[in-house]
Amino acid sequence: MTTPTVFRAPGRVNLIGDHTDYTGGLVLPLAIDRYTTLEVTPQVSAIDLASDADTSPVHLALPVTDPESVSPPWGRYVAGVAAELGTSCQGFRGTVSTTLPIGSGLSSSAALEVAVALACGAPREPFALAQLCQRAEQRATGVPCGIMDQLTSVAGVAGHALRIDCHSLEISPVAIPDSARIIVKFIAHRRLASSAYGQRVTECATAERLIGPLRSASLRDVDSIADDVIRRRARHVVSENQRVRDACEALASGDLATVGRLMVDSHVSLRDDYEVSTGEMDEAVKAALSVPGVFGARLTGGGFGGCIVVLADADSPLTVDEVTSWEVHAVNGALSEPHV
Ligand code: GLA
C-alpha cells in the first residue's frame, strides 16, 4: 500500500483591518495553530475525498468545469480549486479532517482550498497559490472575497502577524510580543454567501467612483460624499486602513494597550459605519472588555456572526473552553509545512 501524503493548511484570525482587502487596503491577520489536513494518495482522472466533518464524500471527475453545482456543498471549495487548475489538476483519493470550527469566520474554507490546491499539484509560488484559492472561493460561493484569508493560510509566519498591503501584496511580518494572549471566541455560524458582504463590496465600488481608490483617500475626501450610507462605508475603510498602520507600529513597539484601543475603535466602526456586526457580537466584545488584563476585542473577519478576537495580557484571568473559545498562536503558512 502507498503511504498517504499529508497536506496541511492553517486557518487565520485577523487582529485588525476588516473589509479593507477587497479595496486593496491594509490587514493584520495571523495564521493560527488550527488546521485542515488532507491525507491522500494519487489516482488518475478523479478526486475522491471523505471528510470527518460531513458524512457525504466528494467525488469529482477531472477536469472540473462547473464547481458551483457540486454536491455536497463543501465539495464546491474542492471543485473550485480543481476548476481553476483545469487540465493540470492532479487527481487523488483520501480524507480531510480539520481542527478549525467550520463556517465560523476563522477561514476554514481558505485552509481547505490551500490544502487541496497543494494536493492537486498547484504551483507553490505564494501569491499565485493564494490568488488561485481566492478565485476558487469566489467561484464556489459566489462571494467576491478579498485575498486576506488565502494569503495568510499560505504565507503565515510563526510568532508574527502579517501586515499585508492588499494592493501591492507586500507582506511585512510584525512580531507578536510573548506577553500577548490572543483568544478567539465563537459567537454564531454564518454564511457570507447569504449576507450583505457582496453589497458592501458594491458600496465600496460606488464610493471609489466618487472619490477614487479608498486605499489612498483621506477622511476629507470621504466627507465630500453626499450619500450617507456610502459615506459611512468609505469612512470605515479609510479609517480602518489608518488603524492598521497605527496597530502595526504599536505592536512592533510592544504597546499592547494601544493595539487594544485600536481594536475597539475598529469594532465600533464595523458596527456603526459598516454595519456588519450583530447584537450578540457587540455583547461578547463588551463582556470581554470587562475582564481584567484585556486590552481590546472586536469582531474578526467578515462579520454577520463568526468569531470575536480578544487581545489580553499574559496574566489575564480570561479562560477558554476549547469548544467555543480558543487561545491561538501564530504559525507558519502551508508552504512551510513539510509535506510527507
Ligand atoms: C472574509 C473574506 C476576506 C475579508 C474578510 C473581511 O473573511 O474572505 O477576504 O474581506 O471577510 O475583512
Image: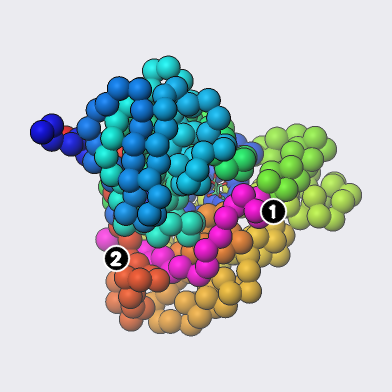
Name the residue at the right extreme. 226
Mark 2 CB near ligand 1 (8 Å cut): no
The reply to whether the residue tagged 1 has its Cβ within 8 angstroms of ligand 1 is: no
| Residue 147 in view of the camera | no
Amino acid on which disc 2 is placed: Ser
Find disc 2 in the rendering and name its residue: 179
Question: Which is nearer the eye, 45 or 36?
Answer: 45
Residue at 56% from the left image edge and 64% from the top image edge: 305
Q: Which x, y percent locates residue 57?
A: 38, 45
Location of mark 1 (residue)? 196
Q: Is residue 42 above or below residue 268?
A: above
Q: Residues within 10 Å of mark 2 (few under 14, many from 20)?
A: few
| 28 left or right, relative to 199 | left
Task: Determine the residue positioned at 65% across, 50% down.
Answer: 197
**Which circle's residue, 2 or 1, is located before the other in the chain?**
2
The type of colouring in the image is rainbow
Q: Which amino acid type is marked by label 1?
A: Ala
In the rendered view of the protein, which quadrant contains the C terminus? top left
